[in-house]
Amino acid sequence: MFSRFAAACTAFAFAASGGAAVAADAQRADFGTLPDGRKVEVITLSNSHGHSARVLSYGAILQALKVPDRKGKSEDVIEGYNDLAGYLAKPNYFGSTVGRYANRIGAGRFMLDGQAYTLAKNDGPNTLHGGMRGFDKQLWQVLDVSSGPVAHVTMSYVSPDGEEGYPGTLKVTVTYSLDEQGTLSIEYRATTDKATVVNLTGHSYFNLSGEGSGHGILNHLLTIPAQAYTPVDDTLIPTGEIRAVAGTPFDFRKPVSIGERLRDGSDRQMVLGRGYDHNWVIQKAPSTVPVLHARLTDPRSGRQMEVWSNQPGLQFYSGNFIDGTIVGKSGKVYRQSDALCLEPQVFPDTPNKPQFGSARLDPGKEYVHTLVYRFSTVR
Ligand code: GLA
């Protein structure tokens, strides 16, 4: 499975290297055994510039992502665990592939073609990230691993008709690709045999200073090129309103540090979200090519990340539920504001909000989400 986007990256990698042979490497290894005896693999993609990505076949989880700082020192910029036991005990969606429907569906139900569907509720009255056992808790099949100008791994999962209450057998693939420039792209594809709803994304918790640095993300500068966002109720379901960001703590059209307005209790939405946990309106509908969703800069390390996606919304979550009860990869306790999530997707609760567009997938059609993280450094 070698996508058009990956092919474009390959061409770019070649051009950027002056046509010289460049290669990124892909390696497979064991990562442990599930309680039912099935083996979990880890696939490591790496290039010669100090970038590497480790992907688990459990949950199609991005377990580690190493990126060089302005001095060339590579560090792991996402939270997670060193072993499978951590992901089984307190998953928190660290690095996960979330689905069948990322984010929330209000009251755990929706209508499609006049039929009501009832989902597993796992977040108060609502369904979050696919339900009790979402795609982040499934073992994926490794289909293809290869090195080359772009190293990649493709995994698949078949979600049975009725799983967690969703209609239709959904066949899903996810491909992680790393090129020589350090661009990591994730491509999600899905087909169904019955009309259903789909929303797949990546749920990495980023800290560009390094997850083990001991520095949080309050000084990271964030830019989100969005004029509006979707306010929520007290269970974090969008009210349906599309509200202008101008004059609010949600205005990230120019770079602003995350800490600057994180505790602004004068805005009711900041209280309801316990900080940032909202969807920004990037575009009205999915586009054919990825557009810029966010730019995150860490003045301390000089690392900068751009997030690109073809999806309409961006959930920015400032890690509000991470409460200091988790010890991460470097032995550091993870607390609020130690990392943040930037999750491109369709708007939360779209199946119940026609004004938000559509999350519908019909037989014979293919769902494609291309999510790209581009890394660079600033002085
Ligand atoms: C998403 C949600 C948050 C939270 C995290 C997982 O980002 O928007 O409210 O549930 O996932 O903890």
Image (tube, rainbow, N blue to C red):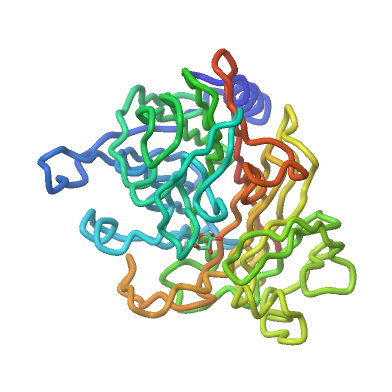
Observer-nearest residue: 70 or 30?
A: 30
Quarter of the figure that contains the C terminus: bottom right
- The answer to whether residue 150 is left or right of residue 266 is left
Residue 85 percent across, percent down from the top left: 21, 58
Q: Residue at x 67, y 52 (%)?
A: 314
Residue 348 percent across, percent down from the top left: 62, 51
Q: Residue at x 58, y 21 (%)?
A: 362
- The answer to whether residue 59 is left or right of residue 279 is left
- The answer to whether residue 99 is left or right of residue 61 is right
- The answer to whether residue 241 is left or right of residue 358 is right
Residue 260 percent across, percent down from the top left: 73, 81
Q: Residue furthest top?
A: 364
Residue 240 percent across, percent down from the top left: 74, 55
Q: Residue at x 79, y 58 (%)?
A: 241
Observer-nearest residue: 30 or 262?
A: 262
- What is the quadrant of residue 264 in the picture? bottom right
Q: Residue furthest left?
A: 37
Vertical order, 278 against 369 (above or below): below
Vertical order, 218 against 62 (above or below): below
Vertical order, 17 against 254 (above or below): above
Q: Residue furthest right?
A: 246
Number of marks present in the image shown: 0
Observer-nearest residue: 145 or 203?
A: 203
- What is the quadrant of residue 20 in the picture? top right
